[in-house]
Amino acid sequence: MKKNKNVPQADGTPQKSAQPVQPPPAPATAAKQPAPPATNGFKAFILLVAAVVGLLIFFGLEPNKMWLDQRIMPYWEDYKEQKLNLDLEERKMARYQTDYIFARNVAAFFEKRGTAGKTLVLVPSTDYFNAHGLQIHVPEPAVFYYFSGLKTIWANSPEASKANWYITARDGGLVFDSVTNQQALQDTIASFNKYKISL
């Protein structure tokens, strides 16, 4: 059985209490209030202005301005032009120009005959064509294959004698000849090798 505590009253006489005395509650700490939305929006605006000013200063410096004009802006100009020409062949021709057109025209000759997959073509160098009045740049065999899917070989390759077709220049045009005589092929290889082969 619990004993009742005697709590003295204001006049000094003790009073019986049924409950124990509780200590007064500690003062509640003030909870952090979130910043008003207006303050967050203002901070974001200040950061935006600072970023824009920083970019203007950065691209205002001469080396950075040259970099922007020469490296970044041409991509934008190309995009505006290329978005109007989305055909794959048109874009390849625009990008690779005469190298691509030459490779495709040569490949088209063999595609029409149905022999493109089993043909190895001996092609002369750019200098050979220039000496014969044709302004044709001949891509190297790996690039030629990338452009057209046709296997080609240069005269300075040890495998040149395996070619079964070769191209020569005559009367301002191209002549396609099949290899029927190994001696004629060797003479053609020797003739092509008189001209410098360069990429």
Image (cartoon, grey):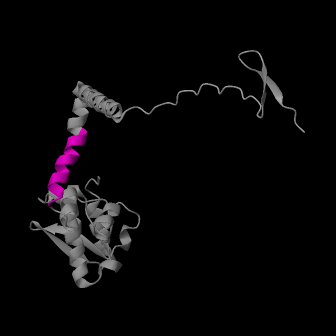
Residue 99 horizontal side relative to residue 120, left or right: left
- Image location (x, y in percent) of residue 97: 18, 58
- In this view, the residue farthest toward the bottom is 114
Q: Is residue 70 above or below residue 118?
A: above
- Image location (x, y in percent) of residue 96: 22, 58
Residue 95 horizontal side relative to residue 182, left or right: left
Which quadrant would residue 126 be assigned to in this image?
bottom left
Q: Residue at x 25, y 63 (%)?
A: 124
**Quick check: can you spot residue 137?**
no
Compare residues 48 and 59 and report the one nearer the observer.
Answer: 48
Compare residues 83 and 24 and report the one nearer the observer.
Answer: 24
Q: Residue at x 9, y 68 (%)?
A: 171
Which region of the structure is painted magenta? Answer: 71-84
**Quadrant containing the N terminus in the rendered view:** top right
- In this view, the residue farthest toward the right is 1
**Quick check: can you spot residue 81?**
yes
Q: Is residue 73 above or below residue 23?
A: below
Which quadrant would residue 184 be assigned to in this image?
bottom left
Does the magenta portion include 33? no
- Image location (x, y in percent) of residue 30: 53, 27
Q: Residue at x 25, y 79 (%)?
A: 111
Q: Residue at x 16, y 62 (%)?
A: 85
Residue 21 horizontal side relative to residue 37, left or right: right
- In this view, the residue farthest toward the left is 171
- Image location (x, y in percent) of residue 3: 87, 32
Main SS, magenta region, reads helix
Compare residues 132 and 7 and report the one nearer the observer.
Answer: 7
Does the magenta portion include 73? yes
